[in-house]
Image (cartoon, coloured by chain):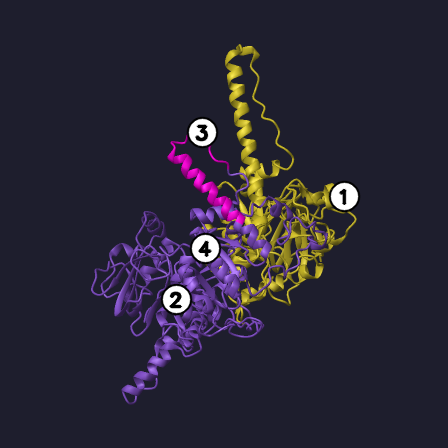
Amino acid sequence: MILTSLTLGALTGLATPAPEPTSDLLALRVGRAETIANGPIDNAVVLIQDGEIVIVGEDLPIERGIPVLDLPDAVVMPGMINCRSRIGLDSRAGTVSEPQILAADEVYAGSDVYAELLELGVTAVALYPPGRGIMGQAAVLQARGESVDELVVERHAYLAMTMAADRNAKKTIVDALEDVDDYLEDVEKDREKWAKKQKKKDDDEKEPFEPEAPDADVLPLLRLVTGDLRGQFSIRKSADLLHLWDVLAERETIDYDLHVPLRDDIDLFYVAERIGERGLRVICDPEIVAHPGTRRERNLPAELARAGAKIAFVPRSSESVDAHRNWRRDVGRLVAYGLDRQTALRGLTLEPAHAIGMGDRLGSIEAGKRADLLIFDGDPFETTTKLQAVLLGGEVVHGELYQ
Amino acid sequence: MKVMHLKRTTFCGLALLGLAAPAFARPAPAPLFVDDEEAAEEETEEEVDEYLLLEGGDIFTGTGAVLRGADLLTKNGKIEAIGYDFYVPEEAEVMDVRGLRLYPGMVALSASSRITEGSFAPADEIEEPGYDPSLDLGSEGDEWDFDALEDADPFAPGDAATRTTDSYDPFSTFLILTLGAGITTVEQSNSAIKLKRYTIDDIVLREGFQTSLSFGSPDARRGLREDFAEARAYLDAMRLWRENDEEGDEPSKRGVNGAVLSVLEGGTRAKFRADDRDELLAIARLAQEYGFRPIIEGCREGWVVADELGRAGATAVINARDRRWKDDLQVAEGGSSIENAAKLHAAGVQVAIKPLSGSIDLGGIAGRDLLALPIEAAFAVRGGLPEQAALESITIVPARIMGVDHRIGTLEVGKDADVLVTDGDLLHYETFVQYAVVAGELVYDKSEELFYAHIRPREQAAAEEEAGDAGAAPEGEADPEHESGDGDHEDGTDDEG
């Protein structure tokens, strides 16, 4: 339908000052679009309407009257997403293990740090609650405005948990999952009682079955078990993962990602193939680490990706703005050392989008997704490349595009 | 020599079998070359028997028998056959160990938790943003779990085993070092733990096999004697009651020490820590009186009362290098002796040897930790212990102490396939464990791990020997396999990826 409304009109036009927008349409003509979903497209046209991408393709004709941004040397990619951070929050926040805690409640709207991140090309950031064990639920922020309500776009992004090869860590998760089982059992019993009662009643007296609401601390885990809420387990070594699988056993409905801080001596390569077989997503920092007991360097993200794991990157220290500034460069270094380029780009955009449960709305340039776009004057992984503009929901929120 | 990569899963193993097929004498059957991973997975999910053949080594079975140039076949983690010219299924993985020796995996008593948990990088190295340990309340901490301590039943050994299994790290660097030292089973807080790599399943062989009793102070002796008397009385009453067709009330267990009772019933073994001659004598008499076979750790003056201990059927857990001065006020002989092990053994005491430290230590005095277990046994040989007894003191005797001698401790058909392959006498200081097999799986290969790969690499030594024999070998093709000898492929993924 959109296609039919396009004409061959503006193909040869230079970048003329944009005419008055007609129906909130905007066409971007760029040298290259890193769509993530469908690989790179040269000489791409991205049509945006009401903050959403309508169509993307090579050399698409643009109907006369639609404002066009003509940037023949530019590279456009989706906004980067940090799926695990505590930037802007209290760094000494405590140690509680309560699943009902929301990071969204911690957000301080007065902080201008999220606007700073936006200028660096980070269009969404997920904040996780503090603590150990079952830490609570992460929130997704987009710097769209001044108030908390405008900032927070998702209050239940994922359930952050830690897992270790340690009795207490395992017990915390096992107990919480058992609470869910108990609740489900109770509901089943109530349902049977209800069914018996209903049989005795006449048709007009029948009531619908209303299960008792679960306790506040059971609800998030119930949502986890039913696949309604993603889980994110922090682990530190390969053994932790085996113990995690021991705890999860046959609960196949749980969707979860792994968060592994990469550091020297980490032994994650032992389980790379098993992670790959299961197609799990690993959230890690773009770090080259030393093989245990040696100084031999390993590119673990590249190894994991080759084994079939999905990789989502977070900045090397997700707590500082500077780390976000160097984020692209750090990931670029892994690419220089053998990480697949598309995997690297995915790891900055679409994979973290999936990790925060918003993969259907963010993270790639394809029809139907929000137009959170970054416009560069060259290859995003090149150190000399400059970020020219940031679009959030189709609006230029940083940079100057109209010469 | 072709050694295949370590297997992680059955399904993975099959793929590898396919890769390594050229190493087989006979061509592998066609299904091994299935390209489609899905199909391969489906096929292997129906339990495929896994065979490993160690071909042509000198097998020191640990029972006293030695079979020169013999084969050992494992099937699904158990020893299937030992000997010459037996049937080998053609899908068997083959390791050529000609010129090497095979020994049962060693068993280490009182090993520290570091073996199964430790890693080079401390676990809490990274600061987790938003987590402040100083705000921790303590009850969540690893070390001081007061609730757990209160809940814990001192006579319920399952707790300790759970702790071990819940924190078992099959990738621990210290675990690899321990396997490299030839130890395949350890005792950790009253549980027998098999040192498996790549998995956390089925690592506990047995838990709660011993009861620690104290017989040191006069008070403790009196108390313990009373406990034994009560437990014996209870058992007698119980027997009488049963003989009388369970008439009347069942005898009450009230006041009976459960730990002592389980010793008398044969459920667990009583363990004492004693060095002093008098104390050893007292234990021997108690044991003979109540008819149980004590385990005595330390036992430094045991050689003085060896006959007594032998009559009591004691097992001594000793260290040949341990020192103790003679009490000059005693007329009788005393103090430690390098002949301790030899004299105890001669008197019929079962001797197990343990190192001075149950950990792997990079500090302190070198060579006193788990890595030197066979050397400790060698010190006992210096003091006169027969070599066979020395081998038993680090294999089957500790296995007997833990009550798992039906599964480990010797190379016998039907037992677990925990096998060491060494380049010489196990007790010799120059000997290295070349391969360690646990439950039929290769878990340590000296040439592939970082630690000792560069020390007297075997391929190189063999090549030099060959060059010496043949006069002058062409220099260029010295040894094509040596390039993997630097430990570059420790994890084995580099080739597969």
Instruction: Using a 10 Å C-alpha cutoff, classify the residue at mark 3 as few (fewer than 14 neighbours), some (14 to 19) or many (20 or more).
Output: few
Q: Is residue A215 left or right of residue A258?
A: right
Chain in purple on the image:
B
Which residue carries the number 3 mark? B248
Which residue carries the number 1 mark? A147
The answer as to whether the residues below labels 1 and 4 share one chain is no
Instruction: Using a 10 Å C-alpha cutoff, classify the residue at mark 2 as few (fewer than 14 neighbours), some (14 to 19) or many (20 or more).
Output: some
- Subunit of mark 1? A
In front of the other: B94 or B21: B94
Label 3, label 1: how many angstroms apart (C-alpha)?
A: 81 Å
Which residue carries the number 4 mark? B287
SS assignment for the magenta stretch, majority: helix
Label 2, label 3: how many angstroms apart (C-alpha)?
A: 47 Å
Q: Is residue A235 left or right of residue B414?
A: right
Q: In the image, what residue type sits under mark 4?
A: Ala
Foreground tag (3 vs 1) = 3
Chain in yellow on the image:
A
Locate residue A148: give its quadrant: top right
Foreground tag (1 vs 4) = 4
Q: Secondary structure at mark 4?
A: helix
* First along the sequence among labels 2 and 4: 4
Label 2, label 4: how many angstroms apart (C-alpha)?
A: 16 Å
Q: In the image, what residue type sits under mark 2?
A: Ala
